[in-house]
Amino acid sequence: MNHMVDIAGSQSVELEQVEAVIDLLLDGRYLDVPPGDCRLTQKLARLGEVMHNAAYAELQRVVAVSVNCNEAVTSTAEMMRAIREVDGRTNAISAASEEMVASVQEISRNSDDVAAEAEQAREAAQQAMGASDRAVRTMETITDAVEQAASKVESLAEASSQIGDIVQQIEAIAKQTNLLALNATIEAARAGEAGKGFAVVASEVKNLANQTARATVDIRSRIETLREEMDSIVVSMEEGAHAVEQGRTVIASTGEGMADVLSRINMVTAKMHDVAGILSQQMEASQEISAGITSIAQMSATNVQSVEALLDVMDQSDGLVSTAVQGLGDKQIKDFTILVAKSDHMIWRKKLSEMVAGRTRLNDKELADHHSCRLGKWYDTLKDQGLTGHPAYVALAAPHKAVHAAGIEAAKRYNDGDLDGALACIHQVSESSRDVLRLLDELAAR
């Protein structure tokens, strides 16, 4: 009877132990499950180990998904920033191309107008050259007329010279007549009464001779005046002929110049027609380019929307991962903080990438430093000498501090409008974060 009581007491103790182990398993305190001193408690301990390993593997998978997802989000966010920049520049190029098309059209219209004006100038130059040719021919006609008039004046001068000779002969005859009349008067005086009639005739002849002499003097004076006038006319006509010749030379030179101008205008007209044709082709090409750029801009806008949708989906999966991590956080899992810290760092990098992509804003004064984050708190309070003495643990402090410092500086520079500086800091975050992840893997694999 006492033996049965002892068995019952022993079973009661075993049930209490089993119940305590089951409570530990229900609470997720897998590492606190004792090894067990009977087959049942040993199996429960084995069950706790299996459940822990399953939870550990699940945590590894969740962290891996989080790391990969956030890595993809980081890359996609950076790509999003580039796509946005491309989209903005494409829109600017599209607007510029449309302005270029309008400018080419305006230039084409202006070139057509210039070509038309060049054609009008060519016609005017042709007309001017024709007028110049006619002026040259007219000048040549005037020159011929002047030369003929000069020849006639010279003939008239010769005739006046001949008249002068005749006048001289008449004057000589008048002198002889006057002399004869004088002699006749003397002889009539000698004859007395018989010579009175002859004296009267001689006196009349003398008067006529004197009148003839006076007339010849007047004629001589007029002929001299006429010859002086003719000489002046000849000189004037020679000067006129010389001036006409100079005018003909100038007009002929002008005609040659107009011919050269006409030739150049013809060349300009031909080139302007070529330019008009080239501009027409350029306008078509510009329109094609503008249409292509507009299409690219539309595709870029579509890509922005697609990437935005992708990032939204990834954000949702990130939320699911966070929920899963929180669920596993209620369980006792070896190196939980070490594993989750990898996810935390990728989330940190993702937020910085989303910041420069314009999807979120970060206040650099509110961001956690390397002591306030989950890993920092674990690092600062860890007492396990098996970890604190590990080389990876010792080396972890520097890159972990650099990650937070560069991230805070990136947010500050971005808020100050220094995008290039923010991107440089984010690059430093990526470099230091890789060291952090590597060291965490080394701690987890110890």
Image: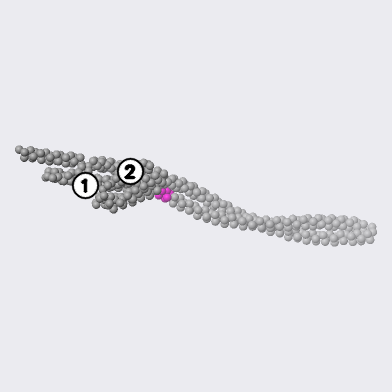
Residue at (31, 50) in percent of width and height? 396
Q: Which residue: 48% across, 53% down? A: 271
- In the image, 328 versus 83, the foreground residue is 328
Q: Is residue 281 magenta?
A: yes
| Residue 319 is inside the magenta segment | no
Could you say where residue 196 lies in the image, as x and y percent from the top left?
92, 57
* Res 98 quadrant in image: top left
Residue 59 place in picture, x, y as percent: 23, 45
Residue on which the image places disc 1 = 57
In this rendering, position of residue 45 left or right of residue 214:
left
Q: Which residues are magenta?
A: 280-287
Residue 83 shows in the view: no
Q: Which secondary structure type mostly characterizes the magenta part of the structure?
A: helix
Residue type at tag 1: Ala
Please state which of residues 313 and 216 is positioned toward the viewer in this rendering. 313
Q: Is residue 187 left or right of residue 382?
A: right
**Image marks 1 and 2: residues in contact by CB distance under 8 Å:** no
| Residue denoted by label 2 | 372
- Number of numbered discs visible in the structure rendering: 2
Q: Quick one: 368 or 239, which is closer to the camera?
A: 368
> For mark 1, does the 10 Å Cα neighbourhood hold few (<14), some (14 to 19), or many (20 or more) residues?
few
Tell me the amino acid under the disc marked 2: Ser
Q: Is residue 376 visible?
A: yes
